[in-house]
Image (cartoon, grey):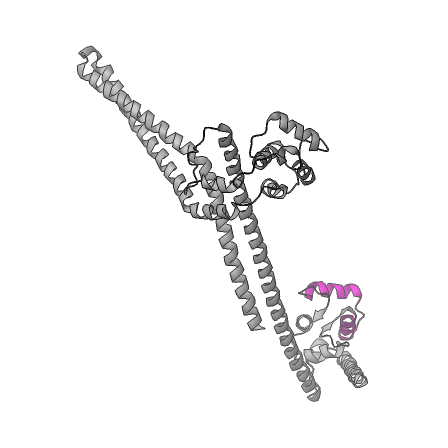
């Protein structure tokens, strides 16, 4: 059992490592996607900040030169202008540094994940564009529908041309069966049989060409073509590729998480099984010890909680149910104990709320009713006659138990 648990624990550790790896990949790719969007903005910010800083410095130098030649009447105003321009130039310098730092941060984020991106690009480079693939990329919320913008990108990738508004309108009129402006899988599969798609030129793999146009840092390289349409088509394909990489990374992380959860569940179930077996063994050991004590108590004519409990545990379940507890307490208190009274005892002493009284819970009841188990009946009942009557009932129950045991044998 311990060896089996150790094996399951190893499996959980391996599943955790697998999930951590996939989750980290997804995190890096998502960060890279954000960084790529920020890259152009960061570059533009650096350019704008540098130009402003340079212009203000030039203005400050010009103002300083003018100050040197200013007359006494204008010198004060000229000095103020120089000071203001220098202050603004310093502020612009700080802004330029911040913009450069941001640009470096963005570039670093892309550099860190570049190898991962390149590896995943290679994995998907030769895939064909199919309706199934298109849905895997776009239908992230799994609602089974693609909107007009997504359809336009899908058509662009499939026919390797930017579709005209007339072509899109014709496709919608012909294949958007319910006219809701969205395409489900069946409608998309019907659409790709259109002549527009069959007329597509045979070219180099869409993603292979897209990958070849991505630098190590993830930035687009210059396209050696004068055809703007090709640039636009390539842009669409690259965006689709980036989305596909993210979708697959997230799916892999989710699958790894499911595997981890399953491994943890199996390990926890085995731990629970082992704990239950150990508890069962402990209970069995305790029951044997208690039974041996009852035999000893009877032989020594000693009245203890163990002996009394055993006498009323008619079904030998190790617990007293409602009827057994009612009979026991009726005998002890020599008054009829109602089910309502028994329910009250259960509410008070049934600690684990399983609807029966265990030996430990019964001991708690006795402890409340008597000073202790020594001189059990004498302590519980001041009236000797009542005590003897209770003893007789216990002896009767013990005799019934012996008879039941002999009959069972």
Q: In the rendered view, does 305 fall on the left or right side of 117?
A: right
Is residue 285 shown left or right of residue 321?
left
Quadrant containing the C terminus is: bottom right
Q: How many marks?
A: 0
239 relative to 378 in the view: left or right: left
Residue shown at the point (75%, 75%) measured from the top left: 332
Front residue of 339/175: it is 175
The boundaries of the magenta stretch are 323-351
Image position, residue 89 (x, y; %): 29, 26
Q: Would you say residue 329 sits in the magenta stretch? A: yes
The vertical placement of 318 against 269, above or below, is below
Q: Nearer the viewer, residue 323 or 6?
A: 6
Q: Judge whether 227 appears above or below 214 on screen.
A: above
* Whether residue 369 is visible: no
The percent coordinates of residue 387 (x first, y second) are 75, 79
Of helix, strand and loop, which mostly describes the magenta segment? helix
Q: Position of residue 4 (x, y in %)?
A: 57, 71
Q: Quadrant of residue 193?
A: top right
Tell me the residue at 60%/43% (across/down): 133
């Amino acid at each position: 059992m311990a060896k089996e648990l150790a094996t399951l624990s190893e499996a959980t550790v391996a599943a955790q490592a697998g999930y951590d790896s996939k989750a980290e990949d997804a995190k890096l790719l998502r960060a890279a996607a954000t960084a790529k969007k920020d890259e152009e903005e960061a570059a533009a910010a650096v350019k704008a900040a540098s130009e402003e800083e340079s212009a203000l410095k030039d203005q400050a130098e010009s103002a300083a030169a003018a100050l040197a030649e200013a007359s006494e009447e204008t010198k004060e105003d000229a000095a103020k202008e120089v000071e203001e321009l220098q202050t603004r130039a310093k502020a612009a310098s700080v802004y330029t540094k911040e913009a450069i730092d941001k640009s470096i941060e963005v570039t670093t984020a892309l550099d860190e994940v570049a190898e991962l991106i390149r590896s995943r690009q290679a994995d998907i480079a030769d895939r064909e564009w199919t309706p199934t693939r298109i849905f895997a990329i776009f239908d992230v919320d799994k609602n089974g529908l693609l909107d007009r913008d997504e359809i336009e990108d899908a058509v662009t990738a499939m026919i390797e041309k930017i579709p005209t508004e007339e072509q899109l309108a014709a496709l919608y009129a012909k294949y958007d069966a319910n006219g809701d402006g969205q395409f489900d899988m069946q409608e998309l599969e019907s659409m790709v049989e259109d002549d527009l798609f069959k007329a597509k030129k045979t070219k180099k793999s869409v993603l292979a060409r897209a990958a070849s146009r991505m630098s190590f840092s993830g930035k687009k390289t210059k396209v050696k073509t004068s055809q703007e349409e090709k640039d636009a088509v390539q842009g669409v394909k690259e965006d689709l590729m980036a989305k596909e990489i993210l979708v697959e990374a997230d799916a892999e992380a989710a699958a790894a998480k499911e595997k981890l959860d399953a491994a943890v569940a199996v390990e926890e179930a085995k731990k629970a099984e082992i704990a239950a077996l150990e508890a069962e063994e402990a209970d069995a050991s305790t029951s044997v010890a208690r039974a041996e004590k009852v035999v000893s108590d009877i032989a020594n004519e000693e009245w203890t909680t163990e002996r009394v409990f055993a006498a009323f545990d008619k079904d030998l379940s190790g617990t007293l149910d409602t009827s057994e507890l009612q009979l026991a307490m009726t005998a002890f208190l020599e008054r009829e104990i109602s089910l309502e009274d028994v329910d009250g005892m259960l509410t008070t002493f049934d600690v684990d709320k399983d609807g029966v009284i265990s030996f430990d819970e019964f001991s708690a009841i006795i402890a409340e009713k008597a000073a202790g188990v020594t001189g059990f009946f004498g302590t519980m009942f001041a009236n000797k006659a009542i005590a003897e009557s209770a003893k007789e009932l216990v002896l009767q129950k013990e005799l019934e138990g012996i008879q039941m045991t002999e009959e069972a044998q």
